[in-house]
Amino acid sequence: MASSKPNNLNASQDHSVAWIAQVWLSFILSLTATTIGILYAPVNPWVRAYLGMGLMFSVGSSLSLAKTTRDLHESKKVLSRIDEAKLERLLAQHDPYQQ
């Protein structure tokens, strides 16, 4: 029994080269601009070090949050695919005319 729905198991959402370049450039530019701002701020070295440490923690936690959010989203997609495959198998095995 063929499914009328398209097979989405192998569908991927690839990003364009332009999008990837824009993301990396904006990340590098923002990190560089903030670092330069911290280095040239008219404050003592302790404040500069504190701001730099805060910047590094913010970048690290942002990357961790993005990875965790992506992983949670992907795990829900996998569970959904498993449930869909089980349902399709049950429907394929079901014969309404069998007693």
Image: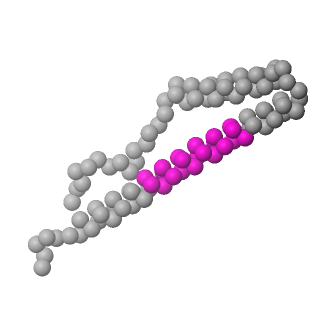
The residue nearer to you, when weighing 70 against 62, is 62
At a point 24% along the width and 54% down the height, the residue shown is: 3
Picture coordinates of residue 40 (x, y %)?
Answer: 82, 20
Picture coordinates of residue 69 (x, y %)?
Answer: 54, 47
From the viewer's perspective, tell me whether residue 67 is left or right of residue 91: right
Q: Quadrant of the N terminus?
A: bottom left
At a point 48% along the width and 51% down the height, the residue shown is: 74
The residue nearer to you, when weighing 47 against 24, is 47
Inspect this view and state whether residue 32 appears: no
At a point 58% along the width and 43% down the height, the residue shown is: 66
Stretch in magenta: 57-77
From the viewer's perspective, tell me whether residue 21 is left or right of residue 31: left
In terms of image quadrants, where is residue 52? top right
In the picture as drawn, the residue positioned furthest to the bottom comes out as: 99
Q: Quadrant of the C terminus?
A: bottom left
Counting labels gives 0
In terms of image quadrants, where is residue 13? top left
Q: Is residue 19 above or below residue 2?
A: above
The residue nearer to you, when weighing 43 against 92, is 43
Picture coordinates of residue 15 (x, y %)?
Answer: 49, 33
Inspect this view and state whether residue 40 appears: yes
Q: Is residue 36 above or below residue 59?
A: above
Q: Main secondary structure of the magenta part?
A: helix
Residue 67 drawn in magenta: yes
From the viewer's perspective, tell me whether residue 61 is left or right of residue 46: left
Residue 44 drawn in magenta: no
